[in-house]
Image: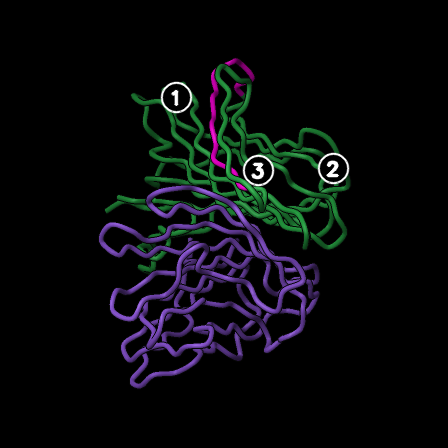
Chain colours: A green, B purple
Amino acid sequence: MLIHGVIASSRLAISGAFESIATSTPTSGSSITFSTIPSTYKHLQIRVNSRFSGTDDRIDLRFNSDTGSNYAYHWLTGDGSAASASGAATQTSALGVAYATGTANIAAAAIIDIHDYASTSKAKTIRSANAWDTNGSGRMRLSSGLWTSTSAVSSITLTLNSGTFATGTTIALYGIKGA
Amino acid sequence: MASTYEPIATTTLGSAASSITFSSIPATYTDLRVVLVGTTTATANCWLTFNSDGATNYSDTLIYGTGASAGSNGHSSATKIVLNGSGNTNTSTPTFYSADIFSYAGSTYKTCLTIGNGDLNGSGDVNCAVGLWRSTSAITSVILTAGSSTWKTGTTATLYGIKSA
């Protein structure tokens, strides 16, 4: 089952297959947590429209409050003039939203898919399309992340690297059911 | 928990048209998603605009692959968001475009994530882009335009609403 953050939802327009679990609209603070996530779905999706008080920030993801070096990620990115790729191993968080922006009225956007999140026998793979544009500069990034734990994901924390959330931010968690 | 992913409207063209418009979009959802699969009478760009705004209030940044190379480009102070990256629509092979439009009813500028795909049996285009509409107005209409061409009969587009708790 293909669950790309941007394209998969077209296969999910079946009543009850795509459900809202929780939504956060922070106007301050540097992190939000979705806790007590039920294990009744097949996959999770986080849809982010976020604004910041600072500039050039990023949002990191952690699962189950795990701050160990159990994460990795890599990405393909475009800055409007060239494409590039990079990655990082043995990290203390997974990259959720890169190169967000604090420019007035501008929001960074992301669709983050967490696959087979309730499995107790597999590591967790994360896919993210995340980007911002400010009319003259921007970043479009496709990211893949890994959490090496075999624990079911029961909570997700999104933390700003610096700065605080600003008015206009909506971070919504959805559950995607399997057959 | 209630279902949160709902079709708002679908248009399947019975005759060629230069654009497809979804209008009178209710403000009751959190995000919108529009999906189009279609062909055009001549190869063309594919554009996305909102609320019939034809002014230079749009911009985008994208990455693309052609089957031979990858790259990135963008547009600033544009009159539309370009959905087709480095490629074009095709006269016989359908191409696919989607756009996720975030907080479309909010009072800040509107950010969207788009994907375009087309394969021509050995060449083609895949791209992913971020688009910006510098308006604080709620989006009430979405317009998909086939550049200087027209969408052919059978082209289909669907608008979905995604509602958070």
Label 3 CA crowd tier, 10 Å (few <14, some 14–19, many 20+)? many
Picture quadrant where residue B119 is located: bottom left
Chain of the residue that carries numbered disc 2 in the rendered image: A
Q: Which of marks 2 and 1 is in front?
A: 2
Q: Which mark is residue A97?
A: 3
Name, please, the residue furthest toward the front: B68
Q: Which mark is residue A151?
A: 1
Q: Is label 3 in contact with label 2 (beta carbons under 8 Å)? A: no
Q: Is label 3 in contact with label 1 (beta carbons under 8 Å)? A: no
Question: In the rendered structure, which segment of residues is drawn in magenta?
Answer: A66-78
Please check the rendered image and state whether residue A172 is part of the magenta-colored stretch, yes or no. no
What's the CA distance linking mark 3 and mark 1? 23 Å
Q: Nearer the viewer, residue A62 or A19?
A: A62
**Residue A98 horizontal/vertical position (percent):** 59, 36
**Residue B63 horizontal/vertical position (percent):** 48, 46
Q: What SS does tag 3 mark?
A: strand
Q: Residue at x 25, y 64 (%)?
A: B93
Q: Does mark 1 fall on the same chain as mark 3?
A: yes
Q: Residue B34 carries which label?
A: none
What's the CA distance linking mark 3 and mark 2? 14 Å
Q: What SS does tag 2 mark?
A: loop
Q: Mark 2 points at which residue?
A: A164
Q: Residue at x 49, y 24 (%)?
A: A87
